């Protein structure tokens, strides 16, 4: 006598396998779509960068020709070297210069936003891929081979939290590289391009047997190159001040704030203790955060007074404050609308790497105070 099985739909192991495959397929489609968007953003960023480079080259030449003509007499030498120009043509060149500068400003904003978008997409993709690796490695069903393999490998498979942390580090590194690329482009690269153009002008002067004018231009060029050399040295100092390793944090801060005050014509009141107990990494964190805070003041605050205070409480933490009397801002609004554009994220991440915390107090119209608190080094 046979017993018939119940005629109802059952759930079997192959159903679970099917669901897992559907999940993996959906994730792969999502990641592929995000990578496609990321590639498109990178492509548009390259296009904008190329246009910016071409525009800079043309604008440099145009600006120099207009400046040369408008600051000197419109004599035969200028007419011959720069080309015959009427008053109407000169006005047209000046109008074109204004239009190109406006486009240059727009390209700056486009490049900045594309860099942020690309970095955030990279971070998001790493987040998803890290979470997927964790989910799939811990959801092996009845198959223990994946877990056993992970144990045999010494647990080298990173979890989702580690993946997110590394993604944030990568994003911060890429943002730093992008910032450095912009500074090199706007600083040393522009100075060199302008020098080449002015040397061509001097060459034309000599060909036209205008030795005195050529000599005057060479004198101006030498002064410009001396100023550019100071900018390059300042740029190198900003990248990695040698004095930080040789002399320590306090002399380096004195040097930097003095240079900052001279460069931007803003008084900086500096209050430092006689000594500090910090590790080398913590000293670097303090300098970088102070540097970032001062650069943000220059870019955004329109301040007329700045104070940098460093104090170490007995057996307590080191507290660093950077205060300005600038226009201030709404920190909550910045976090919501432009979470990766103000440098606040980088400062907080730097503080966290040294076991510290960062606090930003600001109200529109009342200035800003950035406070870094670091635990006492146990070294």
Image (cartoon, rainbow, N blue to C red):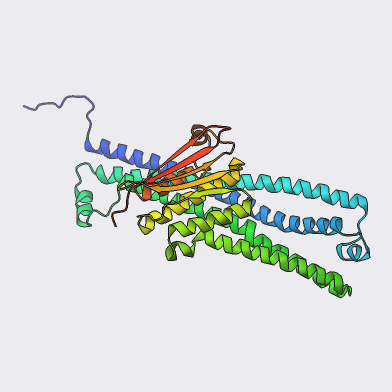
In this image, 39 relative to 10: left or right?
right
Q: Position of residue 235 (x, y in %)?
A: 57, 60
Relative to the observer, which residue lies in front, 168 or 353? 353
- The image quadrant where one finds the N terminus is top left
Relative to the observer, which residue lies in front, 169 or 188? 188
Residue placed at 53% from the left, 61% from the top?
A: 237
> Where 263 falls versus 103 (above or below)?
below
Q: Position of residue 299 (x, y in %)?
A: 60, 45
- The image quadrant where one finds the C terminus is bottom left
Q: Position of residue 238 (x, y in %)?
A: 53, 58
In this image, 105 relative to 208: left or right?
left
In this image, 188 relative to 28: left or right?
right
For the question of whether residue 118 can be seen, the reply is: no
In this image, 82 relative to 36: left or right?
right
> Where 11 falls versus 224 (above or below)?
above
Residue placed at 45% from the left, 51% from the top?
A: 272
Residue placed at 60% from the left, 63% from the top?
A: 232
Q: Which residue lies furthest to the top in this view?
A: 7
């Amino acid at each position: 006598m046979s017993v018939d099985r119940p005629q109802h739909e059952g759930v079997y192991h192959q159903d679970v396998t099917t669901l897992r495959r559907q999940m993996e397929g959906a994730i792969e489609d999502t990641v592929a779509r995000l990578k496609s968007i990321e590639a498109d953003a990178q492509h548009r960023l390259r296009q904008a960068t190329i246009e910016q480079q071409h525009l800079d080259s043309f604008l440099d030449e145009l600006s120099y020709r207009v400046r040369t003509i408008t600051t000197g007499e419109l004599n035969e030498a200028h007419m011959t070297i720069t080309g015959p120009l009427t008053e109407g043509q000169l006005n047209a060149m000046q109008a074109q210069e204004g239009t190109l500068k406006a486009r240059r400003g727009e390209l700056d904003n486009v490049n900045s936003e594309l860099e942020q978008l690309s970095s955030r997409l990279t971070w998001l993709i790493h987040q998803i891929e890290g979470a997927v690796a964790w989910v799939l490695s811990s959801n092996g069903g009845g198959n223990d081979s994946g877990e056993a393999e992970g144990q045999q490998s010494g647990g080298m498979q990173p979890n989702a939290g580690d993946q997110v942390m590394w993604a944030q580090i990568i994003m911060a590194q890429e943002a730093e590289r992008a910032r450095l690329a912009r500074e090199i482009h706007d600083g040393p690269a522009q100075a060199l391009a302008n020098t080449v153009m002015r040397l061509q002008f001097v060459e034309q002067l000599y060909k036209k047997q205008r030795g005195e004018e050529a000599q005057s231009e060479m004198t101006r060029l030498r002064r410009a190159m001396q100023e550019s050399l100071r900018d390059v040295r300042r740029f190198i100092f900003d990248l990695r001040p040698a004095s930080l390793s040789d002399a320590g944090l306090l002399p380096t801060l004195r040097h930097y704030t003095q240079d900052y005050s001279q460069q931007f014509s803003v008084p900086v009141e500096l209050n430092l203790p006689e000594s500090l107990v910090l590790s080398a990494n913590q000293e670097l964190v303090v300098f970088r955060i102070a540097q970032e805070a001062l650069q943000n003041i220059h870019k955004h605050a329109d301040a007329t007074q700045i104070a940098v205070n460093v104090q170490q409480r007995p057996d307590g933490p080191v507290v660093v404050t950077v205060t300005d009397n600038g226009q201030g801002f709404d920190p909550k609004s910045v976090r919501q609308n432009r979470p990766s554009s103000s440098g606040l994220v980088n400062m907080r991440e730097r503080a966290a790497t040294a076991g510290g915390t960062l606090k930003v107090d600001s109200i529109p119209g009342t200035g800003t105070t950035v406070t870094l608190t670091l635990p006492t080094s146990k070294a």
